Image (cartoon, grey):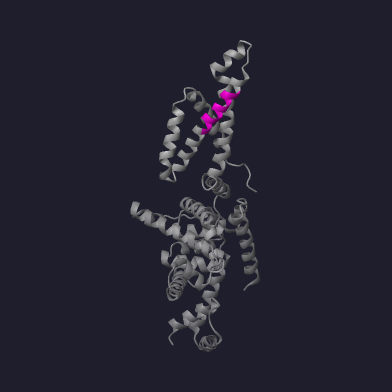
Amino acid sequence: MHPQRAADEILDEKLIEDVLSGNVDAFAGIMDRYRNRVFTLAYRMLSSREEAEDVSQEAFIKIYRSLKTYDAGRTRFSTWVYRITYNLCIDFLRKRREIAPLKEEIMAASSGGPEEIAEARDSAARLHEAVQNLPEDYRIPLTLFHFHGLSYQEICNVLNVPLSVVKNRLFRARKLLREKLDGGEGGGM
Amino acid sequence: MGCDLYEEKIMEYLDGALDGREWAKLEKHLLTCARCSKFLDDMQNQYAMLSDLPLLSPGQDFTQKVMKKIFREKIEGKNMLMIAIPASLMVILVASFLFATCDPAFIIPVLGGTVDWLVLIAKSVVGILNSALWTAGFTLKVITDLQPVLAFPAMVLTEIWMKYPTGAFLAMMMLAMEFSLWVRLLAPRKSYR
C-alpha cells in the first residue's frame, strides 16, 4: 500500500475510534479531511453549489449516524464516505427529476460554474466545464478516479456496478473529454 | 488488435492497471502507430490537467453547521433519557420545596408565629410523593413516544396527580424548570474543537 494512503487510513481510524468512544468533537476532524472531497463529488453530480452543500451536510450527518456500522476490514473509509455521498446524490437527482424534469437541462446549459472558475486559468476553467458537461454516467467514475484517487474496484463498490462497466465508462469519459477539449481549442490538447 | 483496443490499453497503462506482457505488446504497437502515440500524448496531458484541477470547497461555515446539527442530534437521540432523569430529579426537589412553602395551610401557621414541625415534615413528604408521581407520569409520557405499551401506566399516574388540588401551581413551576433545563441542554455549543 502507498505510505501516504496507509497514513491517511490510520488517521481516519483514529478519528473514527474517538468519535465512537463518545468524543463528538473528533467528527470535526473527519469533516476537515473529507469536506472538500464530499462537496466536490456532490457538486460534480448535482451541478449546483447550493444543492451540493445541502447534500454534503446530509451526507456528513448520515456518516455520523452510521459510523458504528462502518467495517474497516471490508472497505476503505474514503470509499464508504463516497458511497454514502453518491447514494444521497442519486436520491436527490431522482427527486429533482420528479419535481422539475427540465431543471437539470436548463442548469446544464447555463452553468456558469462556481467562483473557482473565475480564478483558475482558462484551460482549467474549460476542463472544469467540459467535465461538468459530460453525461452523468461518465462524469461520476471520472471524478472518482481522477479527483478522489479511487481504484477501479473502489469505484465499483461506490457505484455498485461491475468492473467492466466502470472501465468502459471511464474510457468513454476520457475519449469524450478529449473530443470536447479538441473541439474547443480547434486542435490537439 | 485494432487501434480502438490499444486506446483502452493506453488508458489502462496510465491507470496502472496493465500487466507487463500487455505493456510489451502496447509498446511495440506504439513504435509503429503515430495515431496511438498521439493518443498517449493527449491522454498524458489530460491526466495531468485533471490532477491539477483543485477540489471544490463548500462555504466557510459548513463544518460548524453540520457539527451544530450533530450536537443537537446527540442530545435529542440516545442521550435523551440520560438528561430527562436528572432533570426530573431536580424538578422533584424544587417542586417539593415549593409545595411545602407555598401551601396556605402551611404559610398561615408560620405567619401566626406557631410553626408545627410535624405538619411541615408531613407536607414535605406529601410534596415529594406528589411531585414524584407527577414526574414519573411525565417521564413515562416521554417514553411512550417510543413505547406505546407504557401509555396506560403513564395515564394512571397522571390521573392520580390531577386529584391533588395544589397541583396546578406545582405543574407550572415544574414545566418552567424542565423547559429551562432543556433549553440549556439543547442550545448550540459555541466551540466544538
Q: Nearer the viewer, residue A39 or B177?
A: B177
Place of residue A30 in the rendered image (x, y in percent of width and height, measured from the top left)? 60, 57
Q: In the current view of this chain or complex, which residue is farthest to the top?
A: B112
Q: Residue at (50%, 26%) from the top-left corner? A: B172
Q: Is residue B192 depicted above or below B32 in this figure?
A: above
Q: Is residue A105 depicted above or below B76 in this figure?
A: below
Residue B148: image quadrant is top left
Left or right placement of residue B9 versus residue A13 in this view = left
Place of residue A59 in the rendered image (x, y in percent of width and height, measured from the top left)? 50, 55
Residue A181 in view in this figure: no
Left or right placement of residue B138 versus residue B116 in this view = left
Q: In the current view of this chain or complex, which residue is farthest to the front?
A: B118
Q: Nearer the viewer, residue B35 or A40?
A: A40
Q: Is residue B58 depicted above or below B83 in this figure?
A: below
Residue B149: image quadrant is top left
Span colored in magenta: B121-132
Q: Nearer the viewer, residue B2 or A125?
A: B2
Quadrant location of the N terminus of chain B?
bottom left
Place of residue A95 in the rendered image (x, y in percent of width and height, measured from the top left)? 37, 54
Residue B151 in view in this figure: yes
Q: Nearer the viewer, residue A117 or A135?
A: A135
Q: Main secondary structure of the magenta part?
A: helix
Asked whether residue A178 is drawn in magenta, I would say no
Place of residue A144 in the rendered image (x, y in percent of width and height, measured from the top left)? 51, 66
Total tally of numbered discs in the picture: 0
